[in-house]
Image (cartoon, grey):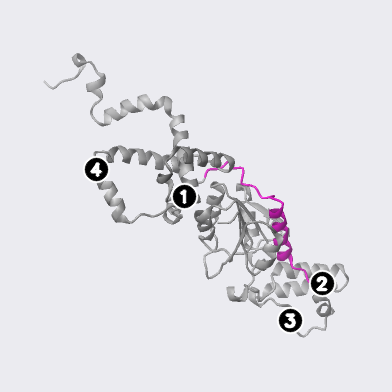
């Protein structure tokens, strides 16, 4: 996976993204849907994910949880212009970077409707070309027309209200100006404002300057049952027959119970602990790479290795935190197993049946 992954489509052509990031290792991906961000992280853990466009309406939109997971794995995530601005505004408290006019308007509460950035577009074969005008761009264009004396404010307000009343795919300048003898028609070719494109370019400029950093997290990513049911594996999935053969072998060797308890502790620590990110995660990756035989890590991709290292960090942190309580916990475990009295209580003091 390249260093930078950019989800984009109707807002900005792929060629302009590549041109804006000369010499950078960048992958331009289609508009993001549910699971796409998580899949990119699982496939290669890019350093930065830039979310510009996303799918919606008839297709599940990119999930907040997967963006949080990406950030918890040390990936820097930024958004602008369209779906990216919406998600950045919603996840700004968690460290997602937002850029541009649309993002700022959402954060300020000036823009509250998702349809303000919505556009219908063609498919990948037609480079996701938009077929309508985004409402945010219509508003910006009308404001510019008023400032430049092309339209009176009253007419601009009427046009904005007319556009807002339309279903978003029907918002086009020819339809809005049909039957009107308006000077706006002649002014539009040079005066039209494309807010979303400007925001996307601002995000790319920030990327070019390495201005998007991993989140400084004070929050814990909760491994909910819903997330565990859909999260990417991050590592090779062994056939059930292979797993069964390994477990049967461990049972035959008498090691299964011991490993089951260790695995359970690992799962609990990974699900409840504070996972490292950024430089701390990189240190743990280097540590496990140095200490674990390469053959035992060979089936882990970059994201799988990062998840394995983070799990190990959580396990070590949990063990360190409770180390002082372990002796008492061992005694309680002896009680559960019915071995406490035999080992702790002097023989002469033990209760015996009459």
Q: Secondary structure at mark 1?
A: helix
Magenta region: 191-220
Give the image quarter of residue 186. Answer: bottom right
Q: Which residue is mark 3?
A: 174
Instruction: Please give the name of the residue rendered at 28% of the width and 51% of the height, measured from the top-left corner.
Output: 244
**Distance from label 3 to label 2 (Cα)?**
15 Å
Mark 4 near mark 2, Cβ–Cβ under 8 Å? Answer: no
In the rendered image, residue 210 lying in the magenta stretch gets the answer yes
Instruction: State which quarter of the image contains the N terminus.
Output: bottom right
The vertical placement of 216 against 170, above or below, is above
**Distance from label 1 to label 2 (Cα)?**
50 Å
Q: Secondary structure at mark 2?
A: helix
**Distance from label 4 to label 3 (Cα)?**
74 Å
Q: Which residue is mark 4?
A: 251
> Which residue extends farthest top?
348
Instruction: State which quarter of the image contains the C terminus.
Output: top left
Q: Which residue is mark 2?
A: 191
- Image location (x, y in percent) of residue 194: 74, 68
């Amino acid at each position: 996976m390249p260093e930078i992954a950019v989800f984009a489509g109707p807002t900005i052509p792929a060629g302009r993204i590549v041109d804006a990031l000369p010499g950078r290792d960048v992958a331009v991906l289609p508009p993001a849907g549910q699971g796409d961000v998580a899949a990119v992280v699982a496939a290669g853990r890019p350093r930065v994910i830039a979310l510009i466009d996303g799918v919606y309406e008839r297709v599940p939109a990119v999930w907040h949880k997967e963006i949080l997971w990406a950030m918890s794995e040390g990936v820097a995530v930024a958004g602008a212009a369209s779906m990216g601005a919406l998600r950045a505004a919603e996840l700004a408290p968690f460290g997602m970077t937002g850029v541009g006019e649309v993002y700022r308007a959402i954060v300020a509460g000036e823009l509250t409707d998702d349809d303000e950035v919505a556009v219908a577009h063609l498919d990948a074969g037609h480079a996701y070309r938009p077929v309508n005008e985004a409402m945010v761009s219509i508003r910006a264009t009308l404001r510019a027309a008023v400032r430049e004396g092309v339209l009176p404010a009253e007419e601009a307000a009427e046009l904005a209200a007319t556009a807002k009343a339309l279903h978003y795919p029907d918002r086009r300048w020819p339809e809005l100006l049909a039957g009107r003898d308006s000077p706006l028609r002649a002014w539009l070719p040079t005066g039209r404002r494309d807010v979303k494109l400007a925001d996307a370019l601002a995000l790319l400029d920030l990327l070019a300057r390495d201005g998007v950093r991993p989140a400084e997290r004070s929050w814990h990513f909760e491994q909910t049952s819903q997330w565990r049911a859909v999260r990417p594996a991050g590592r090779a999935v062994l056939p059930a027959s292979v797993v069964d053969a390994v477990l049967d072998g461990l049972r035959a060797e008498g090691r299964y119970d011991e490993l089951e308890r260790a695995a359970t502790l690992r799962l609990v620590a990974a699900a409840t602990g504070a996972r490292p990110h950024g430089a701390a995660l990189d240190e743990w990756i280097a540590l496990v790479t140095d200490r674990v035989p390469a053959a035992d890590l060979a089936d882990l991709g970059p994201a799988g290795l990062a998840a394995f290292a983070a799990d190990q960090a959580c396990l070590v942190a949990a063990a360190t935190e409770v180390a002082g309580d372990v002796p008492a916990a061992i005694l309680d475990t002896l009680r559960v197993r019915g071995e406490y009295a035999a080992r702790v209580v002097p023989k002469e003091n033990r209760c015996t049946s009459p």
